Image (spheres, rainbow, N blue to C red):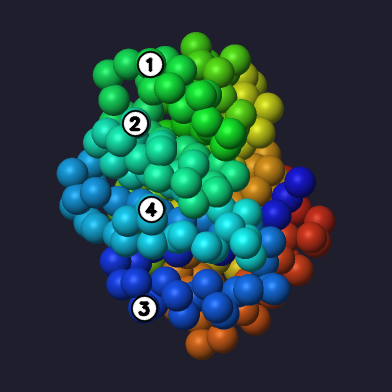
Amino acid sequence: MQKVIPAILTADPAYLKERLDLFRGESEWLHIDIIDGVFVPNFSVPVLALDGAAAHFHLEMHLMVADPVAYLKDCEAIGAKRVVFHIEAIDHPQEVLKKAKQYSFQVGLALSPGTDPGQAAGFADSIDWGLVLGVVPGFQGQKIIPSRLRSISELKATVPVVSFDGGITEENIREVFAAGADYVLVGSAIMRAEDPVAAFHKLSAIAEQPSPRPDL
């Protein structure tokens, strides 16, 4: 599966539109960070700002929010393919998963640094994939926390598909895949590049090369 998916985090609707136009026809998938200013101290565009984008992309919505249930209806309305929320954001993940399963999109659990991957084990039968964050959620441009690579294999012991988000660069992307990630989400290494589309394709090409054995 090993894919690179561009990740967009912005509170500016004009920037969002520019990025959507830029990647149309270049990437099948886009990962969109949705932030409420409560779960993490940052803000993003609302889910409905993606209205119409599903005509050109498969959308994966990353809910970095305190009340993910409040966003599910809008994710369905814009045609999201996948929706992931944070296990740390709620007291009863199973209740949120039950509500999310009423919609057509796939559902995943995200784990922030400091969260034991074993916490997701009890929900393995209710989720489609797990997301390991390699940085503190909410801001792009952070450096990867190397120890988070170990969490990928730990999570894959119970969850068949695992993605990784945060701190991906040309220098470490193959290590992340070698650690067991099925796909990676890349924000600043793509979006802050002089040519974002070229950066995306270069990372995708690097990801296709043989991966080194990770030093876990």
Q: Which mark is residue 14?
A: 3
| Spatial separation of the CA atoms under disc 4 and disc 2 | 13 Å
Residue count near mark 3 (Cα–Cα under 10 Å), binned few <14, some 14–19, many ≥20: few
Number of the front mark, 4 or 1: 4
Amino acid under disc 1: Glu
Residue behind mark 2: 69
Q: Earlier in the sequence, mark 1 or mark 2?
A: 2
Q: Which mark is residue 47?
A: 4
Q: Which residue is depicted at the point 52% across and 63% down?
A: 52
Residue behind mark 1: 95
Amino acid under disc 3: Ala
Badges 4 and 3: C-beta atoms under 8 Å apart?
Answer: no
Q: Quarter-wise, where is residue 128 in the image?
A: top right
Q: Quarter-wise, where is residue 30 in the image?
A: bottom right
| Spatial separation of the CA atoms under disc 4 and disc 3 | 14 Å
Q: Earlier in the sequence, mark 4 or mark 2?
A: 4
Q: Is residue 113 above or below residue 126?
A: below
Q: Earlier in the sequence, mark 3 or mark 2?
A: 3
Q: Is residue 73 above or below residue 211?
A: above
Q: Which residue is depicted at the point 59% across and 15% down?
A: 125
User: SS at mark 2?
Assistant: helix
* Residue 152 percent across, percent down from the top left: 57, 35
Q: Tell me if 59 is positioned left or right of 40 in this view.
A: right
Residue count near mark 4 (Cα–Cα under 10 Å), binned few <14, some 14–19, many ≥20: many
Query: What is the quadrant of the C terminus in the image?
Result: top right
| Spatial separation of the CA atoms under disc 1 and disc 3 | 36 Å
Residue count near mark 1 (Cα–Cα under 10 Å), binned few <14, some 14–19, many ≥20: few
Amino acid under disc 2: Val
